[in-house]
């Protein structure tokens, strides 16, 4: 980090939050890199809104603009097989958004993806790969979700 960097530049930077997210979460292997990167992309926006240095409108605007980059190509492979940049970062972030919405819907807005990630961290297990995940019906319904818009001033992952 440069000694010339000022506080405003640090507040507007996404890289530190993104990379710190990787440090906090367990390694899930290269095959599931889309989940590691998707969580880091998705959590970065949420964390910065909660810290007060980014508006929710800016985050939603960026997601609406950037998440389509994560959609599969015609006859495209799933996230585990397609390791392209857009699918890895934005496809993973889209999965995280849909998971967050599904958790909120199924718990009556009591819990979300953030609570799930906190539970992973609280677990403290050193053998993250030995964990199992129970299956759920997928994809979740997206009914009732409002569209948020705003002007984005961010330039990350472009």
Image (cartoon, helix red, strand yellow):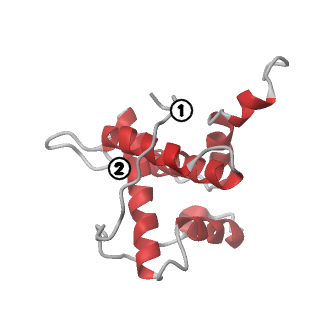
**53 over 9 or under it: above or below:** below
Question: Residue at 54% across / 70% down in the picture?
Answer: 131
Q: Mark 1 or mark 2, which is nearer the start of the sequence?
A: 2
Where residue 154 is drawn, which disc sits there? Answer: 1
For mark 2, what is the residue? 80
Quarter that holds the C terminus: top left
Question: Residue at 69% across / 50% down in the picture?
Answer: 52
Q: Is residue 71 left or right of residue 11?
A: left
Q: Going by the picture, which residue comes out furthest to the right?
A: 3
List x then y, in percent, for residue 94. 39, 52
* Nearest to viewer (mark 2 / mark 1): 1
- The secondary structure type at the circle numbered 1 is loop
List x then y, in percent, for residue 144. 32, 70
Q: Is residue 152 left or right of residue 10?
A: left
- The secondary structure type at the circle numbered 2 is loop
Question: Residue at 44% across / 57% down in the picture?
Answer: 96
Quarter that holds the N terminus: top right
Q: Are marks 2 and 1 in contact (CB under 8 Å)?
A: no
**80 over 106 or under it: above or below:** above
């Amino acid at each position: 980090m440069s000694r010339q960097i000022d506080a405003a530049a640090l507040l507007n930077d996404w890289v530190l939050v993104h990379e710190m997210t990787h440090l906090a979460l367990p390694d899930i292997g290269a095959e599931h890199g889309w989940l590691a990167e998707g969580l880091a992309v998705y959590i970065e926006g949420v964390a910065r809104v909660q810290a007060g240095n980014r508006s929710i409108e800016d985050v939603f605007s960026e997601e609406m603009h950037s998440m389509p980059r994560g959609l599969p190509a015609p006859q495209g492979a799933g996230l585990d097989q397609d390791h392209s940049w857009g699918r890895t970062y934005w496809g993973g972030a889209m999965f995280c958004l849909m998971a967050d919405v599904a958790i909120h819907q199924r718990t009556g807005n009591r819990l979300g993806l953030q609570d799930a990630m906190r539970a992973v961290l609280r677990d403290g297990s050193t053998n993250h790969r030995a964990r199992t995940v129970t299956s759920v019906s997928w994809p979740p319904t997206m009914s009732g979700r409002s569209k948020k818009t705003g002007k984005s001033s961010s330039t990350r992952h472009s």
